[in-house]
């Protein structure tokens, strides 16, 4: 079982910041998704035909899976900072203060993709994707400032 640090709770991102992250990331996803679909259609027109004739459920599944993979790749490549998180000054971190592994990012985003109602569950105490993956979204500036202050205090009198 992971250690849970109180400093993580004190610097949890606000619900407003979390909602802004979601909206910014969703817009970024749709832009990238649209560009990729357009490129695929130009490269192979049969793909465009498939999209036009595909069942609604297949298109929804394609969107959900694509969003989960997009979110995973962005968080894994940027160390927990999607475009929305960069703009709002937030970051994904483990409940013990460690940086999440690629597997942690994958679990977090697959939960968010599989459990469709989880998309806005962070408006409660924690999102299911945060609770089940032992991650939190924190305000990075305040978190780093408190960690630095504690480090400074601990170093007083040390040689």
Image (spheres, rainbow, N blue to C red):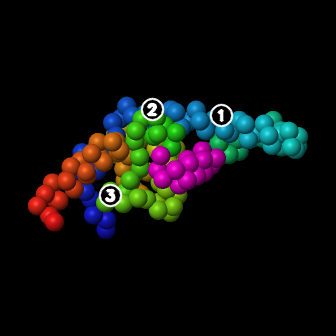
Q: Nearer the viewer, residue 38 or 65?
A: 38
| Apparent side of residue 36 relative to residue 60 in the rendered image (left or right) | right
Given the current orientation, which residue lies at the most extreme right position? 45
Residue 156: % across, % down:
13, 57
**C-alpha span from label 3 to label 1:** 33 Å
Residues drawn in magenta: 64-81
User: Which disc number belongs to residue 20?
Assistant: 2
The 10 Å Cα crowd at callout 2, few under 14, some 14 to 19, many 20 or more, is some
| Apparent side of residue 45 relative to residue 113 in the rendered image (left or right) | right
Given the current orientation, which residue lies at the most extreme bottom position? 1
- Which of disc 1 and disc 3 is earlier in sequence? 1
Residue 14: % across, % down:
33, 36
Residue 79 magenta: yes
What kind of element bears circle 3? loop
> Main structural element of the magenta stretch: helix, strand or loop?
helix
Residue 31: % across, % down:
65, 34
Q: Nearer the viewer, residue 130 or 118?
A: 130
What kind of element bears circle 1? helix
The 10 Å Cα crowd at callout 1, few under 14, some 14 to 19, many 20 or more, is few
Q: Residue at x 55, y 53 (%)?
A: 77
Task: Check disc 3 and report the residue beneath it.
Answer: 97
Q: Nearer the viewer, mark 3 or mark 1?
A: 3
- Which of disc 2 and disc 1 is earlier in sequence? 2
User: Which disc number belongs to residue 31?
Assistant: 1
């Amino acid at each position: 079982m992971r250690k849970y640090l109180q400093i993580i709770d004190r610097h949890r991102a606000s619900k407003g910041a979390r909602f802004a992250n979601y909206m910014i990331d969703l817009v970024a996803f749709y832009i990238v998704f649209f560009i990729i679909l357009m490129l695929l259609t130009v490269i192979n027109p049969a793909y465009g035909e498939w999209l036009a004739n595909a069942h609604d459920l297949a298109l929804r599944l394609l969107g959900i899976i694509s969003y989960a993979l997009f979110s995973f790749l962005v968080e894994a490549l940027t160390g927990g900072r999607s475009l929305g998180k960069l703009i709002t000054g937030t970051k994904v971190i483990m409940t013990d203060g460690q940086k999440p592994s690629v597997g942690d990012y994958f679990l977090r985003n697959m939960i968010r993709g599989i459990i469709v109602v989880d998309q806005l569950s962070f408006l409660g105490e924690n999102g299911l994707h945060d609770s089940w993956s032992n991650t939190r979204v924190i305000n990075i500036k305040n978190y780093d400032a408190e960690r630095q202050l504690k480090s400074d205090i601990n170093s007083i009198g040390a040689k």
